[in-house]
Amino acid sequence: MDDLSAFARQIFESQPFSQFIGARLTGSGPRDAEISLPISGQHQQQHGFVHGGVISYLADNTITFAGGLALGGNALTSEFKINYLKPARGSLLVARAHATGVGKRQAVCQCEIYSIEDGEEKLCAIAQGTVVAAAQ
């Protein structure tokens, strides 16, 4: 495991909410991150779809990881926008983010969130956000 992956894993494992919700950091790179979440009943809303707040968490956290890794350290989301494209259901959610524009103090990132249903990935949301370097 390289230093970047170890750093990302250390940060992720120190997030109580990520542990509580059951999320896993399943990939990281110099400008990229992937977070997965096995879907369970506690993640659903009244119609049986994954709650929008769960999808929003995945977008926010994955964007922050991609931006933070691109900026080389701890980071915070300063804003993000999400578009829900279709209801999420199935067995797993996967969020993949990439830092598309990186400056000295901020990174703009894009994220796609997929639901895995019957072994097939279905795009259920797209998000974009700005990540800023956290004060050290």
Image: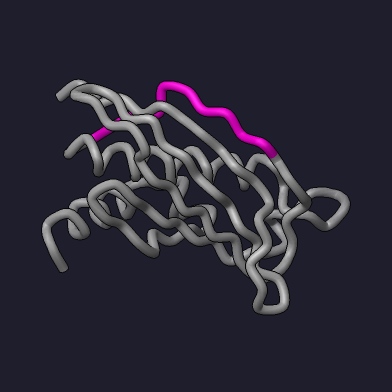
Residue 49: x, y in percent?
A: 79, 55
Q: Identify the residue shown where x is 72% and y is 47%.
A: 51
Number of numbered labels in the structure image: 0
Q: Is residue 91 magenta?
A: no
Residue projecting furthest to the bottom: 119
Residue 60: x, y in percent?
A: 49, 38
Magenta extent: 74-83
Question: Residue 102 lies in what quarter of the image?
Answer: top left
* Quarter of the figure with the C terminus: top left
Residue 19: x, y in percent?
A: 44, 55
User: In the image, 10: left or right of 13?
Assistant: left
User: In the image, 37: left or right of 115?
Assistant: left
* Quarter of the figure with the N terminus: bottom left
Q: Is residue 79 magenta?
A: yes
Residue 122: x, y in percent?
A: 68, 62
Q: Is residue 22 above or below residue 31?
A: below
Q: Identify the residue shown where x is 67% and y is 36%.
A: 83
Q: Identify the residue shown where x is 59% and y is 60%.
A: 93
The front one of 36 and 107 is 107
Q: Main secondary structure of the magenta part?
A: strand
Question: Residue 2 lies in what quarter of the image?
Answer: bottom left
Residue projecting furthest to the front: 100
Residue projecting furthest to the left: 3
Identify the colour scheme used. one colour
